[in-house]
Image: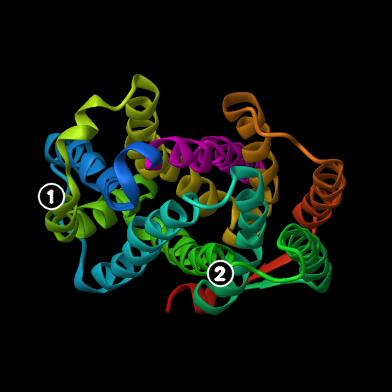
Amino acid sequence: MEREKIGMLLGLVGVICFSLTLPATSVAVNYFGTTVVGLGRTVIAAILVAIVLLVRKEKLPSLRQFKSLIIVALGAVLGFPLLTSWAMVSLPVSHGAVEVALLPLATAGFAMYRAGERPSLKFWLSSLIGSFAVIIYALNLGFGHLKIADIALIAAVILLGFSYAEGGKLAKQLGSWQVIAWAIMIGAPFFIIPIARTLTADMLHAPLQAWISLSYLAVISQFLAYVAWYSGMAMGGIARISQIQYLQPFLMILFSAVFLNESIPFVTIVIAVIVVISVIVGKNATVIRDSVAEKL
């Protein structure tokens, strides 16, 4: 129980850090563009990660672990940053943030498949209620249909959910921070050329706020937040810790109001209450761990 409580705390720290990702992306993308913001954060983070790996003299992952790291890299290092950066060009943070609430459901589904966790009916009902609330909210803002940017965000959520489940499982073997560290090192070399082709002299004149946002995305969102998040999932269970992420969209909305002066409609508050209740119910639901499946 003590280990699960620590896992919940670490998961919460990770979610709070992730909650500033969309607001920071919304600021940075206006000055640096989608490619630099979506992929450049990984290249910057790779410099920090390389230093840490060299100082600690970490050994290379095994071939089996490397295959899992590719999945993590596709979701957490490539798919989610790039797709959200593209979507934030046309969507306000308060709109895009609510769709991120689908992430716990995606993570739990992949966790059941990859990590041998079997959530109870109570868990799934709470997840579905929260997810349906988010979908209705998105449709309402989109006047009855989803925009292309919305589809991009949903695709980003699916990719990230898969990588979260894989990373949470791998963290038990490789270590929490090592998972995202090696995933960053795998992805960064492939991003250098696309980034170099989009760099312009005008980017050097970006305001301080834009540079701070890009630095936050690289150091916190892309690395340190994942350290806390994967540690939490390794200690508290992937499906259970994923429930905390229902709070993330509304923390994002709060931060967007504070830092970007976006308005918060009343319907957002109503959805927030529904989702928070789902978190509380889901957090206390039974999750069965299949020890045999965890070894696969």
The three-letter code of the residue at mark 1 reads Ala
In three-dimensional space, the C-alpha distance between marks 1 and 2, rounded to whole angstroms, equals 28 Å
Main SS, magenta residues: helix
Say whether residue 108 is visible. yes
Q: Earlier in the sequence, mark 1 or mark 2?
A: 2
Disc 1 designates what residue?
196
Give the residue pinned by disc 2: 151
Point 81% across, 41% down: residue: 265
Above or below for 71 versus 293: above
Task: Check the image and tell me how it is coloured.
Answer: rainbow
Percent position (x, y) of residue 291? 55, 73
Q: Position of residue 284 (x, y in %)?
A: 80, 53
Residue in the image at 83% along x and 41% along y: 269
Q: Is residue 283 left or right of residue 266?
A: left
Number of numbered discs visible in the structure rendering: 2
Q: Which residues are magenta?
A: 1-29
Q: How far across and how far down the image is residue 226, in percent? A: 43, 45
Q: Residue furthest top?
A: 208
Q: Depth check: 33 or 255 in front?
A: 33
Left or right, residue 213 beside residue 8: left
Is residue 161 on the magenta stretch?
no
Write the residue at 19% across / 50% down.
Answer: 198
In percent of width and height, residue 210 lies at: 37, 29
Residue 37 shows in this picture = no
Please state, as top left, top right, bottom left or bottom right, where the C terminus lies in the image.
bottom left
